[in-house]
Amino acid sequence: MKNRSKGVRVTIALGKFLVFKAIRMVTLLVAICFISFLLVKNSPIDPIQAYIGADMLKVGPEQRENIAEYWGLDQPVMKQFFNWGSALFSGDLGTSMIYRQPVADIIGERMISSLMLMLTAWFLSGIIGFSMGVLAAMKKDTWVDRLIKWYCYTLASTPTFWMGLLLLIVFAVWLGWFPTGLGVPAGVLAEDVTIGDRIRHLFLPAMTLSIVGVANVALHTREKLIDVLASDYVLFAQARGERGWLLVSRHGLRNIALPAVTLQFASFGELFGGTVLAEQVFSYPGLGQATVEAGLSGDVPLLLGLVIVSTLFVFIGNLIADLLYYVLDPRTREESDK
């Protein structure tokens, strides 16, 4: 009975936790969409001019007014926002001004490419960063540790676009091992594109994000493992003769795995921001490139749709990190119950 009542309390606490997170997500979405809408509306970009493009000189004032009326740009700013919000509640994200397509269709087409890029980079950076952190802690104060720390500190201050340009110059231009850009070979029909073609075009953008993303995980893992190796129970294990990898695998990994995983999930925001820059460097057709195009063209429906998707992506990553701590670490539940 005691275990059953404890399970009920944990379930109720978890339900409250999820409800609080849901309310926070909704308020966050409303605030970010409103701020993004105001920033675009107060920017010097003329959405009508971006919509017309090269034919600007051929369009008269009456046609400009008709275009503004068609897209609702002649209405007050707040009315435009509420019109967009009411359409959103009915499931309509609007129509993109630059692509002349429904925003949901554009996001759906580019979501797969961006997810492939982000998940590949996320997985690689986590594995590489965790391995580097463990190695640095095991070789503390040696040349290996100093080399890994120097590498991580250098990467922490390295812009994503600079790393992308460097890889592009070396591996695509000088060596010619990989294509210089795009998501698939140019001039090839969609049904003729192979998995190998997609992997070759994905490799350099994914490596750019992976190389830059290992620093936080590696340094955090190193510090946590050094603390664990200095604990009393590890010293007792050393006194019994345990050394090297056997000691770390038995007593260290289980204590540092959860913080490393939660930190990796919490890095979704940085990952999406890096994706925007990487996709621009490699002309990779994903959500990041669409975000830049929407911002530069004043395409409010597309930009707000992308803001919603990116916010949900980052929020879900942080939510998973919080849930891992909440479910697996009893101390977190005890603090929330007080």
Image: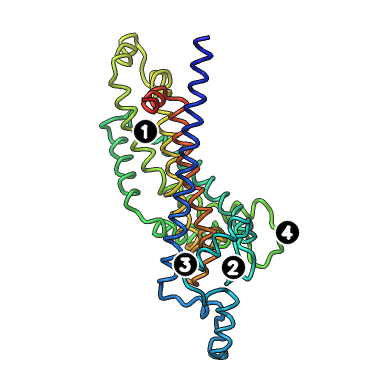
Mark 2 or mark 1, which has the lower sequence index?
2
Please tell me which residue is depicted at 52% across the width and 18% down the height of the picture.
7
Q: Are marks 1 and 4 in contact (CB under 8 Å)?
A: no
Q: Which residue is mark 1?
A: 221
Mark 3 or mark 4, which has the lower sequence index?
3
In the structure shown, which secondary structural element does the residue marked by tag 4 occupy?
Answer: helix
Q: How far across and down, in percent of the image, does residue 301 sit?
A: 55, 65
Q: CA distance from mark 4 to mark 2?
A: 29 Å
Q: CA distance from mark 1 to mark 4?
A: 44 Å
Mark 4 or mark 2, which has the lower sequence index?
2
Q: Which residue is mark 4?
A: 192
Amino acid of disc 2: Ser
Please identify, in this view, whether the residue under mark 4 or under mark 2 is nearer the observer.
2
Judging depth in this view, the residue of 267 and 248 nearest the camera is: 267
Q: Residue furthest right?
A: 191
Q: How far across and down, in percent of the image, does residue 188 sit?
A: 69, 64
Amino acid of disc 3: Met
Mark 1 or mark 4, which has the lower sequence index?
4
Q: Which residue is mark 3?
A: 78
Judging depth in this view, the residue of 321 and 92 nearest the camera is: 92
Mark number, residue 96: 2
Please tell me which residue is depicted at 48% across the width and 23% down the height of the picture.
10
Please identify, in this view, whether the residue under mark 2 or under mark 1 is nearer the observer.
2
Judging depth in this view, the residue of 301 and 161 nearest the camera is: 301
Q: How far across and down, in percent of the image, does residue 329 sit?
A: 42, 24
**Quarter of the figure with the C terminus:** top left
Please identify, in this view, whether the residue under mark 1 or under mark 4 is nearer the observer.
1
